[in-house]
Image (cartoon, rainbow, N blue to C red):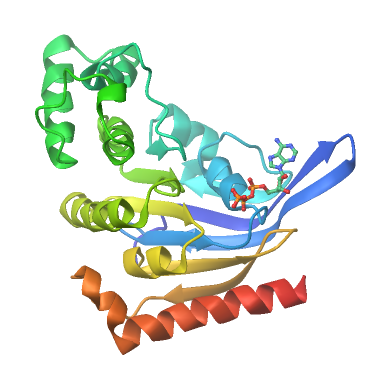
Amino acid sequence: MSAPVISARDLSLTFQTNDGPVHALKDVSLDVAKGDFVSFIGPSGCGKTTFLRCMADLEHPTGGTITVNGVSAEEARRNRAYGYVFQAAGLYPWRTIGGNIRLPLEIMGYDKADQAERVKRVLDLVELGGFEKKFPWQLSGGMQQRASIARALAFDADILLMDEPFGALDEIVRDHLNEQLLNLWGRTEKTICFVTHSIPEAVYLSTRIVVMSPRPGRIADVIESPLPVERPLDIRDTPEFIEVAHRVRDGLRAGSEDA
Ligand SMILES: Nc1ncnc2c1ncn2[C@@H]1O[C@H](COP(=O)(O)OP(=O)(O)OP(=O)(O)O)[C@@H](O)[C@H]1O
């Protein structure tokens, strides 16, 4: 087996606050393999975002180790190993969609022709071809979120870190984006780490589901999905899907009873 893309060993993170220490993560160990689609699910405040932010070097663990592409999270960030998609699309309203996607490329010093080619390619990838010159307010919430995914894809990072990217969208739009994301993952072979609160979303998207327990955040269960790679939306009505969803629910329940 090839080396894991992300490897956490006994990872802990305690925030020091005015009200005393907050143990956000405790002894979390996990390997994410190349091409995996890993979802993190757990109750609010169990450390999902903190774990993702540790991978991205946006938080610094107080114990244990984490490597990304075999190097420290800091070095991986400098190597631009990942694209990060936040809960809110976070597009600059004064820039066009193309201008928003181009921004990180400008900062990284890509030449103009390369920028233009990349913007076009990623807009096509998220099915927003033709929207380059529109402003964010001219797009629906789901389209804005797709634009933010395009921005994270524009510089060829092999890893996509996504923090509840579809949480604020209605169910029909979310279903559609879930389908598109799976499609995109299949075509690009990225490694994806995805935070969600939704059991069906986690089961539909993932090759592995990491169930986390309440504070201090620990891993309660890691479920290898038995579902095929090809997943039409109606796979959610199959007994296999329902069985995995049950197991996630059991893991969530067991995790909160242990806490
Ligand atoms: N910068 C910070 N300073 C202090 N405490 C923090 C900080 N960031 C997060 N926390 C605390 O750490 C815990 C884990 O937070 P985190 O955002 O990782 O949880 P989460 O599982 O992503 O929650 P949610 O599902 O609600 O987004 C929470 O109790 C939170 O209040």
- Ligand 1 shown in quarter: top right
Q: Residue 157's x, y, as percent?
A: 31, 37
Give the residue displayed 46% in from the left and 68% down from the top: 199
259 vs 56: above or below: below
Q: Is residue 17 left or right of residue 220?
A: right
205 vs 24: above or below: below
Residue 227 in view in this figure: no
Quarter holding the C terminus is: bottom right
20 vs 104: above or below: below
Quarter holding the N terminus is: bottom left
Q: Residue 29's x, y, as percent?
A: 60, 62
Of residues 192 and 174, the one nearer the viewer is: 174
Of residues 16 and 62, the one nearer the viewer is: 16
Q: Is residue 211 left or right of residue 217?
A: left
Give the residue displayed 36% in from the left and 16% down from the top: 93
Residue 232 in view in this figure: yes
